[in-house]
Amino acid sequence: MASVSTPPPERSHSGLGSKIKMPFRGLKEKLHDNQPLNEVRVQLNHKKHQIGKFGNLFNPQHRHDEAHEKACDEKRTEISESNRFQSYFPERDGNLVKWYVDGRDYCWAVSVALENAKESIYIADWWLSPELFLRRPPHYNPQWRLDQILKRRAEAGIKIYIIVYREVEAALTCNSEHTKHALQALCPEGSPGFGNIKVMRHPDHNVLENAADMTFYWAHHEKFIIIDYEMAFIGGLDLCFGRWDNHQHALSDMHPEAVANEVWPGQDFNNNRVMDFKNVQDWKQNALSKADSGRMPWHDVAMGLIGPCVYDIAEHFVLRWNFIKRDKYKRDSRFEWLELEGRQGIDEDLVGVQRPSHPVGGYQLHPLSPLESKAIDGRGTVRAQVVRSSADWSSGILTEHSIQNAYSEIIRGAQHYIYIENQFFITATGDKQAPIKNTIGRAIVDAVVSAAKDNRKFRVIVVIPAVPGFAGDLREDAAVSTRAIMDYQYKSICRGEHSIFGQLEKEGIDPTQYLFFFNLRSYDRLNRTAGVKRREKASGMSYRDAQIAHDEQLTGEASMPIYPKGVDLQPQRSTVCPPDLPPRRKASTSSSLAVASRISGAATVAHHAMAEQTPISAEPWEGDAEDEVNHWIQEELYIHSKLLIVDDRIVVCGSSNLNDRSQLGHHDSELCLVMEDSRGLASTMDGQPYEAGYHAATLRRHLWREHLGLLPPQDLDGSADPNAQPPGEESPNEVGEGEESWKFVEDPLSDELWEAWTAQATKNTEVFRQLFHADPDDHVKTFDDFNGFLPPKGTKPGHIYDRMIPPHVVRRRLDTVRGHLVWTPMQFLRDASMAEKGLQVNQLTESIYT
């Protein structure tokens, strides 16, 4: 029989010396055996660490000073240094990428993709409006409101993770607190889907809240979605109010024949230049009257993709989720740590996973089904790479500015043209333009100098907003911050020896032969005709009252029915010019003007600036022609795209603006995608045969056709439009190949195309100047000029300047407007101090504006 060793007898600890050494011997075991006491111990441990976090205020390196943190930083640095642009993410082949231009196509595609989600949805956004309708008109599409889609998905068992920027409430009105509570209330405890929608807000602005780090000035600015680790969307479009639009970019949305036909309900009808959003938690209310004002139209670009880069975008989300979990919700059981397949074990620190001694919230491996089942490899022909601006405050990592690296390197290597659409243009050519630090401007100078030396035809074409999208008369003191941004832009472009123009002139190069800056602008007509006024008087209800009553009905619980399984969620088809809508749900008489016959006059006439339309002079108007003059309006078409296209081969698209906030890495957090298509497109460049990249060339042609008014207006209904579907082999972009306008914009350096582009921009600029005195304008060089150019302060902006002008003259001139291109006024306030130093503009605030 084998001998069995026996353990030595325990030493006796009954002596006084032993009791002094271990006075609480056995307490640990007793605590574990006693669950309530153990919970107390764990809570005390949590409280100790929570209080200890206050010490981080005096240690800015507290996420990078311990040995394991330094080791993780070294791993990330090694990965980044091995990749192009010093990005953490590698270049990946085999991506299927689809472009989306403007909100109708993007929102429709997102609605389809979300509805088809099978296991998980990630959303990261600067602003997310739960009450946003992804399909229009809202009256006929209540089931396609964003919160209703997410509710259905959560009830179906889909796990939904959302990260939104927590705004500084004194400066911004997006109300992320409402976003969080509204979404989490969709599936209350005891209902299907409870716990399946999780929303994080970050950063905190008060150290006493969760004892987390404070960040006042910088924002989480990314806008991306990942569905099932199979599909992603990324670009400039937030899922929020004010972004939905189509190619004709209407300003007016007044439908007296049926208020139910409105396209932009409640706060979604917005004009940031007139009035900022207010009380968005009560989204159906709007202080901006549709009878008196036009909306600010919105131009934007985004991408949808299937392919290996989806994993990289998801990894960025997981890192941010775990970082916020650590920073803010570490001891909150509602939020779990996300483990990522492929980043487990010794590499889980790369995505911010921590293993505290007493974890709260548990751990969940993602994707929820094996990664190998996703079939994302080899789906397309685009070689792509994720680049980002990210840092310690935003993701817990060392600063990465691979977006700026990508912009600079790609621009510097351009051989034929650089095309930029961006919300801002603030950059430096060196170290002499403080406080501006990003040097994309130097890359532009280098590219132009190289082309001039080689005697190559070369153009830099930039499309930016006429005025940053902030409310207020530019003449007022309250607009000094808006003028400060414009001042930095002009100093980046053309004012001063260190501007791009100044540096080129120093090289003996005429910058006006190479660099061209444009804005976009749209016109429309308010549909408050004499007939509408008569019916208002007869019914005792104003159109505005009818609109509010309708929106109240639309957004009430009764208008959000529960859809049983098998219900057809496909919307009924509707068009926009003029509406030819299907049979309507019976409208309450309280929300109708109770018209007995159809009211003549279109709700919008903006489509006349697009292709295949009758002249605006043929558009009917109900009432006196002289009264019509008072109803014409114009507004800048706000460019929110964050887009770079070079040589019809390379595209960069994402959330990053062209300014320090987006480009430096340690300010706003951003995410972009660099794309180059191996699929060629036989094309022409400067009259010579040229092999373009299919993705870049088709996107550039589509954008130029829209800006020139060579595309027809869009229907509201995107169900039959391939460009409004999610990415996939069965729904590639419809590019218009074979159409006359497609061929016309083929060669970006064509003299014929360039003459048409500049001539139309000149004509449009002249019309908006003559009819509306649209500002900013080259004729305004001082504030005295400004006062003489615009109507008196307090007059409603955007209307016809000379109310005595003959009505037929207005129509005749508007007939010559095509598309939306206008020139950027390079002489605007040239001889004035645009932003005097003071409380709003000083050394402490300058970095906020740049």
Image (spheres, grey):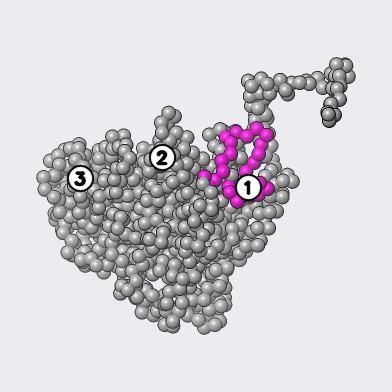
Q: Which comes before the other along the chain, label 3 or label 1?
A: 1
Q: Are marks 1 and 2 in contact (CB under 8 Å)?
A: no
Based on the picture, tell me whether residue 341 belongs to the magenta stretch. Answer: yes
Q: Nearer the viewer, mark 3 or mark 2?
A: 2
Q: Amino acid at mark 2?
A: Ala
SS at mark 3? loop
Image spot of residue 447 (x, y percent):
55, 74
Residue at the spot of label 3? 584
Q: Residue furthest left?
A: 596
Within the image, what quadrant is residue 769 found in?
A: bottom left
Residue at the spot of label 1? 344
Q: Amino acid at mark 1?
A: Gln
Residue at image x 17%, y 42%? 593
Q: Is residue 832 left or right of residue 573?
A: right
Residue at the spot of label 2? 156
User: Magenta stretch?
Assistant: 340-368
Residue nearest the viewer, comparing 837 with 589: 589
Q: Which comes before the other along the chain, label 3 or label 2?
A: 2
SS at mark 2? loop
Q: Amino acid at mark 3?
A: Arg
Q: Residue furthest front?
A: 1
Q: Which comes before the other along the chain, label 1 or label 2?
A: 2
Give the crowd class for mark 2: few <14, some 14-19, many >=20 residues within 10 Å. Answer: some
Query: How far, Cα to Cα, is label 1 from label 2?
Result: 29 Å
Query: How far, Cα to Cα, is label 3 from label 2?
Result: 30 Å
Give the crowd class for mark 1: few <14, some 14-19, many >=20 residues within 10 Å. Answer: some
Residue at image x 45%, y 68%? 696
Residue at image x 26%, y 69%? 816
Residue nearest the viewer, comparing 539 with 50: 50
Within the image, what quadrant is residue 11 found in?
A: top right
Q: Are marks 3 and 2 in contact (CB under 8 Å)?
A: no
